[in-house]
Amino acid sequence: MTRKLTITVSEEVYEGLHRTVGRRRISQFLEKLARPHVLSQNFETAYQDLAADQDRERDALAWSEGVIGDVNKPDAAR
């Protein structure tokens, strides 16, 4: 069962959500963000759910590959 919730955010946050997450995906984005903070959950199940999220896994891989490239740069620590 789902429930409707009205929230108030700044104009900048609203525009950022539309730009970053896209229309009609904000509710799903906010639920995924809030869920681990408000529901007790089995860690194994939670990790399986995260691994099943292909968009998240693709983003995480791209991020980690980018960080690995920074490790060998002398000014990366600054």
Image (spheres, grey):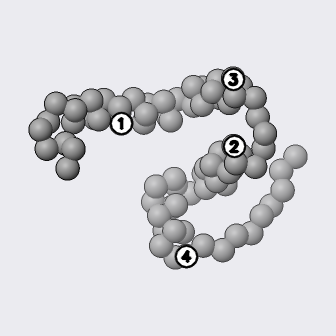
Q: Earlier in the sequence, mark 3 or mark 4?
A: 4
Q: Is residue 67 above or below residue 27?
A: above
Residue type at mark 4?
Answer: Ser
Q: Amino acid at mark 2?
A: Pro
Residue depicted at x 70% and y 48%: 37
Along the viewing direction, whichever of 51 and 22 lies nearer the viewer: 51
Query: Is the residue marked by circle 1 packed among few (<14), some (14-19), or many (20+) residues within 10 Å?
Result: few
The quadrant in which residue 70 appears is top left
| Sooner in the amino-acid sequence: mark 4 or mark 2 | 4
Describe residue 10's horizontal placement relative to residue 42 as left or right.
Answer: left
From the viewer's perspective, is the residue at label 1 or at label 4 nearer?
Answer: 1
Please give the residue where the numbered disc 4 appears in the rendered image: 10
- Residue 11 position within the rendered picture, expressed as x and y whole percent measured from the top left: 52, 76
**Label 1: element kind:** helix
Q: Position of residue 58 (x, y in %)?
A: 43, 31
Residue matched to label 2 = 36
Relative height, residue 25 to residue 76 (above, below): below
Q: Is mark 3 in CB contact (under 8 Å) with mark 4?
A: no
Amino acid type at image mark 3: Glu
Farthest-out residue, right: 1
| Disc 3 target residue | 44
* Residue at 52 percent of width and 61 percent of height: 17
Q: Nearer the viewer, residue 2 or 31?
A: 31
Q: CA distance from mark 1 to mark 4?
A: 28 Å
Q: Report the front residue among 27 and 46.
A: 46
- Badge 3 or badge 1: first in the primary sequence: 3
